Image (cartoon, helix red, strand yellow):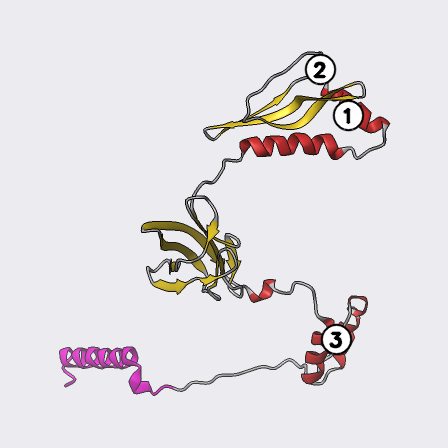
Amino acid sequence: MPFGRLTVNANATAVFNQRIGKVNTQMPLLFFTNENGLKNGYLMGEGLWRWKLSVAENEADQSALNDLISKTVQYLSVKDDKRRFKVFTSKSAYDENESIQFNATLYNESYQPVNESEVKLQVKNEAGKIFSYVFSKTENGYQLDAGTMPAGNYSYAANTVLGGQKFTASGSFYVNALIAEYQQTTANHQLLNTISKQSNGKLFMPSDLLKIADEILKNENIKTISYEDRKYDELINMKWLFGLILTLLSVEWFLRKRNGEL
């Protein structure tokens, strides 16, 4: 950076200070400010590409400058969470066979973690059923193991009281359905071999697949089986036939009557 004297306010936090030749100064090169929750970062210079060349010349870690830039952006973009009561799950999605873990932190007016108060939690499933819990106290916070839960969406709400002031926190999580077929996607050949022996079968590896046809031809238990199902019905149950016979008899009687044979 150009030589000059730089003065910043007392709230600035310097990361790097300038060095003129071999002389270290107290003038910041890279510094941050935080006023009313608004973060700003300042680099008093130019030519970052020279840093890259210096890193390559000294055969240093090539990611040093990238890490500096990415962490600077991360620091400036993340908002400070000033809530005095925080409750959260260890992750947002669980499997059916996993225990649901909750953590909670309570701060006093000096923003120091305390755990004198009792923290209660209510978990509600999609059907509206509510499960009530009480957190266990740890060294500087609270912890709760709610055990396993069926698959579905859940919401939770926690509350506590500190110094006569009531605090609440809420959130949600999801439990995935456990599909047995997905638990082990690699073939267990030892298990397959055991099953084949118990059922008087055989296990064929991929290199022996052509032998399956020969085994089927030699197996006396594998035969073509034909089934015949016979069913008998009484003629009297065939109402259409009975009606036909009755109609023919009626026609015959009518014709004979008309011809004078009766």
Identity of the residue drawn at 36% across and 50% down = 168
Seen from the viewer's position, the closer of residues 261 and 13 is 13
Circle 2 or circle 3, nearest the eye? 2
Q: Secondary structure at mark 3?
A: loop
Q: Which residue is mark 1?
A: 52
Seen from the viewer's position, the closer of residues 146 and 83 is 83
Q: Locate residue 60 relative to residue 33 in the image: left or right.
A: right
**Residue 113, x across and y down, in percent:** 48, 50
Q: Which residue is mark 2?
A: 1
Provide the residue span drawn in magenta. 233-262
Q: Is residue 86 above or below residue 205?
A: above
**Between discs 2 and 3, the one toward the N terminus:** 2
Circle 2 or circle 1, nearest the eye? 2
**Residue 222, x across and y down, in percent:** 68, 81
Report the Cα–Cα distance between label 2 and label 3: 75 Å
Task: Please name the amino acid that badge 1 sits on.
Answer: Lys
Q: Which residue is mark 3?
A: 203
Q: Is residue 3 above or below residue 225?
A: above
